[in-house]
Every structure is written in C-alpha cells, then in structure tokens.
Image (spheres, helix red, strand yellow):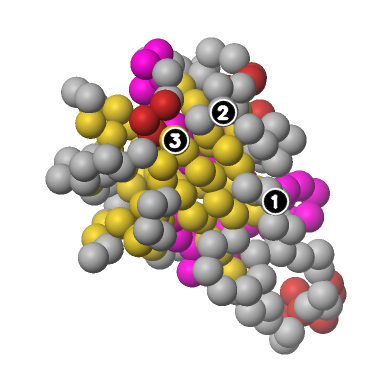
Amino acid sequence: MSVSLQKGQKISLTKGNEGLSKVIIGLGWDEAAKSKGGLFGSLFGSSGPAIDCDASAFVLQNGKLTDKKDIVYFGNLKHYTGTVQHMGDNLTGAGEGDDEQIVVDLARVPAEYDRIVLVVNIYQAVQRRQHFGMIQNAFIRIVDARNNQEMCRYNLSENYDNMTAMIFGEVYRNNGEWKFNAIGQATTDPGLVELARRYM
C-alpha cells in the first residue's frame, strides 16, 4: 500500500523491502486552466505557450554536486555509472499519470554517491512569464520497479505563485538504508544551472 507523505516527511524505501533494487521516480503536473477574462486575458489572450516542465536529478557526493556529469536531465539522459536514467522529456505535461520518470538502480549506485535530488524547473520560465502558480496537481512518487507498485507519494499542494523551480524530493542513503525525503521547496531560480549551484 502506498504511503501518502506530507512536506518534510521521510520514509525508508529498503527497510522491510527485501531485494528492492530499482525504483521508478515518477513526477507529474498539470497546467492550471487559463483564465480568459480580465485584463491579463484580453491583453495576452489565453493561448500562451504550453508550460514545459523539466525534471532533473542531481547525483551528489557528500551532499555536493561535484561535476556536471552528475546532472541527469533531458540533455544527459543517463548518468555515466548507468544507475540513474531519465526516461525522456515531456513537453506539455498533458495527460494522466507520470509526466516524466527517472529510474534509479539503488543497488548499483556507487558508494561515493549518497543523495539523488529531484528537481523540476520550467523551461524558459522568465522569458515566457510562467511560474509554478500556473501548475496544479504536482506530485512525486516512488514505484518499486519489480512489480510497478507505488511505495509512496507526495502531492505538492502549496501556493507556488512566481516560483520558477521546485525541489520535489530526494532519495538518500543513510546507514546502508535508502530513504526518501519529501522536500517541496520552491525557488525563483530561472533555470537548471542556477538550481544546480545550490548544491555546489
């Protein structure tokens, strides 16, 4: 049975889960309905560009990003160790279920890596005047790849007006156990580079 997490809650993924190796980290979001009325609607119309959210993973050593090759995103879909893989970019966020997925082979992540941070930023947010206040139903979930059973889910339900990037959560190693932390921290970082700097 899936556990529903609140912001800041942590859960062990491997405890009581013998043989857990690969997990699928599903991230999802929907564009909120655009308002047609009012000054904004009449000035800009309701047909602005679709909001393109991009999920990425920072693979950290001692909590730090030490090399740009440790960023897994639409421009670098597979970590050089083969243990973290992005399943591809979704340009609109339309449709049900996960919009983007990152698969992590926990059992094979090299010992020097202790943390995988999962972030989402809006592509060209500043230029397109888009922010997470225009997004709804955002979530991150961890799925056991052996049986496609959802282990836990965190729904990000706060007001994120004017925020252009989000730290959804992290999978981290603690005393030989893999755990998940529901972070839900919004930022005004304009892109992935600025978001990555937080971990350097």
Residue toward you, 176 or 195: 176
Q: Position of residue 76 (x, y in %)?
A: 70, 32
* Looking at the image, residue 151 lies above or below residue 56: below
Q: Is residue 73 left or right of residue 166?
A: right
* Looking at the image, residue 65 lies above or below residue 104: above
Q: Is residue 118 magenta?
A: yes
Q: State the residue lying farthest toward the left.
A: 16
Residue drawn at 37 percent across, 58 percent down: 147
Residue behind mark 2? 82
Q: Is residue 77 left or right of residue 165?
A: right
Which three-letter amino acid code belongs to the residue tagged 1?
Asp
Which three-letter amino acid code belongs to the residue tagged 2?
Gly
Does the residue at mark 2 contact the one at mark 1 (Cβ under 8 Å)? no
Residue 150 location, quadrant: bottom left
Residue behind mark 3? 105
Query: Spatial distance from mark 3 to mark 1, Cα to Cα?
Result: 20 Å
Q: Position of residue 199 (x, y in %)?
A: 49, 23
Residue drawn at 58 percent across, 38 percent down: 85
Residue drawn at 30 percent across, 42 percent down: 20
Query: Spatial distance from mark 2 to mark 1, Cα to Cα?
Result: 18 Å
Residue 84 seen in render = yes
Magenta part of the chain? 111-140
Q: Which mark is residue 89?
A: 1
Element under disc 2: loop
Q: Is residue 38 magenta?
A: no
